[in-house]
Image (cartoon, rainbow, N blue to C red):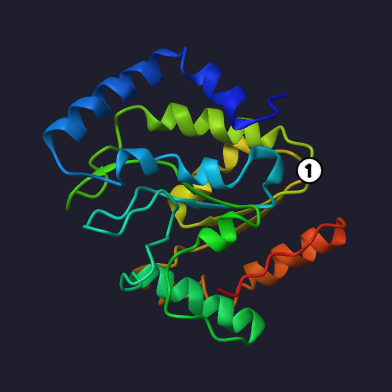
Amino acid sequence: MIETWEDLFSLIKQKDYAKKINKILSYEYGKYVVYPPRKEMFKAFQLTPLKSIKVVIIGQDPYHEENQAMGLCFSVPKGVPLPPSLINIYKEIENNFGFKMKNNGDLTYLAKQGVLLLNTILSVRKSMPLSHQNIGYDEFIKDVLTAINEQDQPIVFLLWGSYARSLKKYLNNPLHLILEATHPSPLSANRGGFFNQYHFVKANNYLKSHGLTEINWQN
């Protein structure tokens, strides 16, 4: 079993798809404005070690406008206006626990508690959503999720939206809990299926039932 991200990435680096992605990114970052800054692409892995994971939240690709993407899905730096999906996530957290969230979109506080904020596409050209969709990240995310699936600690996966739910095929560990909902974007959430799902309470209850410290979702 893979014990650390370093172990996993040392294996991934040898694979053809990783060499292809690296070559494409060197070109893209050199020629275009690409988000997040390259040094922040792997921030989710840096802040949340493999053995520390309690919850996995899966996003798709990074925010594609200036000063938004920071290597953590749904997260924006402090001082940046909250994107619509994050506003809805905060509303649901408030609905789950009854407290008020601050107007601060930096989710680093969750990553440090064991919430892996995983975008499945790690980069994007400015103003071009999904522009890096077909450069090989599908193979990368398969390897990442397979490694997480093999971990023997209790982990809760929050799969929001059809894309995140499509990755359930890589997750079959009976120690892990999978919670599914529609995407928190206004287009999806306002049709029903995201609000009042109580995923944050259910995640904490699952962790608590296995003797683990709950996530403090309040920022």
Image quadrant containing the C terminus: bottom right
Image location (x, y in percent) of residue 182: 48, 64
Question: Residue, x 65% and y 30% (percent of image)?
Answer: 4
Image location (x, y in percent) of residue 13: 46, 17
Q: Quadrant of residue 40?
A: top left
| Residue type marked 1 | Gln
Camera-side residue of 163 and 40: 40
* Residue 126 drawn above or below residue 134: below
* Residue 1 drawn above or below residue 167: above
Left of 82 or right of it: where is 215?
right
Classify mark 1: helix, strand or loop: loop
Image location (x, y in percent) of residue 65: 22, 57
Label 1: few (<14), some or many (≥20) within 10 Å? some
Left of 24 or right of it: where is 75?
right
Left of 98 or right of it: where is 208?
right
Question: Residue, x 41% and y 77% (percent of image)?
Answer: 190
Question: Residue, x 58% and y 27% (percent of image)?
Answer: 6
Report which residue position mark 1 lands on.
Answer: 153
Q: In which quarter of the image is residue 135?
A: top left
* Residue 125 drawn above or below residue 209: above
Image quadrant containing the N terminus: top right
Question: Residue, x 43% and y 74% (percent of image)?
Answer: 104
Camera-side residue of 44 and 121: 44
